[in-house]
Image (cartoon, rainbow, N blue to C red):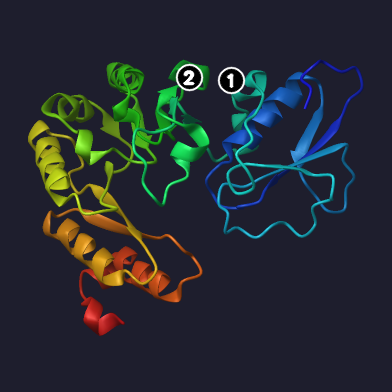
Amino acid sequence: MGTERRVAVVKIGLVDVDSHNFPNLALMKLSAYHKAQGDSVEWFCGYSTYDLVYASKVFTFTADNGYLPDSAIRGGWGYNCDLLPDDIEHIMPDYGLYPHIDYALGFTTRGCIRKCDFCLTPSREGYIHYHASIEEFWQGQSSVVLLDGNIIASDHGLNQLQWIADRGLKLDCNQGIDCRLVTPEIAGLLAKIRWLKPIHLALDNHYEDSLDKAVNLLRDAGATPKNYTVYCIVKPNEIDDAYERVMFCKGLNCDPFAMPLDKSDKQSRHFARWVNHKAIFKTVEWKDYH
């Protein structure tokens, strides 16, 4: 797609294929770019005609929009790993596209140091590297949501966390904190931050000792709230393995959050419903639920 300025006004239709409450960052950037060109931008309507239609989705399991024209430009991890051109990727997002959003949203790093067998990040983004500073997508909001895959694995990421702490902004690291990398110094930094939600950690494989150590370091440092959320991947036919990890999290007084790797697997979904419905999880044993 070319990024040269055009004279004629182009009518743009945007489709957030996932259609959930979380904003689609790529569409926010495309909207900002086209509005800066003087183009007309709106959410796609099947009864209207458009010069360009952009459809974006994050999840491969999300069904496509049946009204999309064949000419629609499809992007996002749910379709492919094509990147936006730099002058669109590094533009201030159009926060007006999602009026209910009152926080800044973006990446400061891309890639990861890990090579988890269930994760696409290393193959699509490579080793962890600099992407942007928060000021690139911050418009003075009191809260920031970062999408970095492994922010504390990067010196730049740690500097950005310090930037957040210095300004007293609230933060949610949406993809979580790598418990295997938490040191007393990092725990101290995380304790200086005002968290929008409990800190997200993960126990997707058996590194319970690292999680135990990280949780105690964070609590000792005073990182609040202290009922940290722990993501637990649930693989098909490995419910017993996921159960062990979930119960370990419960023993640490953390809140496990089960994430089925295959959304079509009924047993994984059933297990996730038990874990994630806290009123049930706290009162009903798994053996009695399933």
Density class for disc 1 (Cα within 10 Å; few <14, some 14-19, many ≥20) is: some
Taking 175 as reference, is 280 above or below it? below
Closest to the observer, 71 or 140? 71
Where disc 1 sits, the SS reads loop
Q: Quadrant of the N terminus?
A: top right
Residue 102: tell me if it is visible.
no
Taking 112 as reference, is 250 above or below it? below
Q: Position of residue 253 (x, y in %)?
A: 14, 55
Q: Residue at x 19, y 33 (%)?
A: 182
Amino acid type, callout 2:
Ala
Density class for disc 2 (Cα within 10 Å; few <14, some 14-19, many ≥20) is: some
Q: Residue at x 79, y 19 (%)?
A: 37
Closest to the observer, 136 or 244? 244
Q: Position of residue 112 (x, y in %)?
A: 38, 33
Q: Position of residue 190 (x, y in %)?
A: 22, 29
Q: Residue at x 25, y 51 (%)?
A: 203
Q: CA distance from mark 2 to mark 1?
A: 8 Å
Q: Is residue 139 left or right of residue 36?
A: left
Closest to the observer, 82 or 64? 82
Where disc 2 sits, the SS reads loop
Q: Is residue 196 left or right of residue 29?
A: left
Looking at the rendered structure, which numbered label has been put on residue 51?
Answer: none
Taking 243 as reference, is 36 above or below it? above
Q: Is residue 36 left or right of residue 51?
A: left
Q: Residue at x 35, y 23 (%)?
A: 157
- Look at mark 2 in the image and give the residue it sits on: 132
Amino acid type, callout 1:
His
Q: Are marks 2 and 1 in contact (CB under 8 Å)?
A: yes
- Look at mark 1 in the image and give the residue it sits on: 90
